[in-house]
Amino acid sequence: MNIMPEYALYYIFVAAFVGYLLGSIPFGLVLTRMAGLGDIRKIGSGNIGATNVLRTGNKFLALLTLLLDIGKGAIAVLIAEFLYPGLGIYAGSGAFLGHLYSIFLKFTGGKGVATFLGLMLALNPMVGLTSILSWLITAAIFRISSLSALVAAIASPIASLYLQQYKLAIVAILLCILIFIKHKDNIKRIINGDEPKIGKK
């Protein structure tokens, strides 16, 4: 379905806003509280993502958090594309921003990597798979989640450019910048050799 020009901005806003609300759901926090593990923001790094959930020692909850965070980025894209082709990139970006600045957490949130991978996977499977593979290879070699996340983020715009998906590359670059900003403390620890390994409680 083609979007009529006079309604284009309206549809873009709605797609981004609904995506934002979906992305704002802090699954890591919800799951750990339901499991009786308390507030995940007071554990480990204080992040609401799967890596910090893993530090509770509950691998199942960490995996579920990862899948749900990936899923909300992908679902936002797929629903928007189903309703109005071309809006997926805005809904996915909204979901990413929702995870970073959740309305349910007073505009704080996670670092967005899983949601980023989910929306990229839905927008272009080759780009998404390239980023996921980059994460897995880096994690297998260095066992550092944050480093793996940064490599995966960089891989996305590079893959988009290689596939001549220029609009996607621009969005990927902008979201990648936000991921790096969110990881500024991790980057300092990586440089100093103090960043904890994957699975460390």
Image: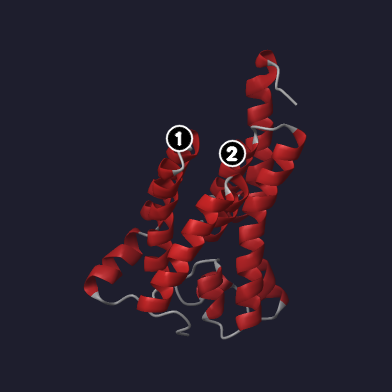
Rendering coords of residue 108 (x, y %): 52, 54
Q: Quadrant of residue 12?
A: top right
In this view, 26 is above or below 56 = above
Q: Amino acid at mark 1?
A: Tyr
Q: Quadrant of residue 11?
A: top right
Q: CA distance from mark 2 to mark 1?
A: 12 Å
Seen at 65% across and 34% down, the residue is: 87
Seen at 41% across and 44% down, the residue is: 162
Q: Amino acid at mark 2?
A: Ile
The reply to whether residue 110 is in sight is no
In this view, 192 is above or below 6 = below
Which residue is the extreme one toward the left? 192
Which residue is the extreme one toward the top? 6
In this view, 10 is above or below 132 = above
Q: Nearer the viewer's eye, disc 2 or disc 1?
A: 1
- Whether residues under marks 2 and 1 lie with C-beta atoms below 8 angstroms apart, the answer is no
- Disc nearer the start of the sequence (2/1): 2
Seen at 62% across and 60% down, the residue is: 69
Report the side of 148 relative to 63 (left or right): left
Residue behind mark 1: 166
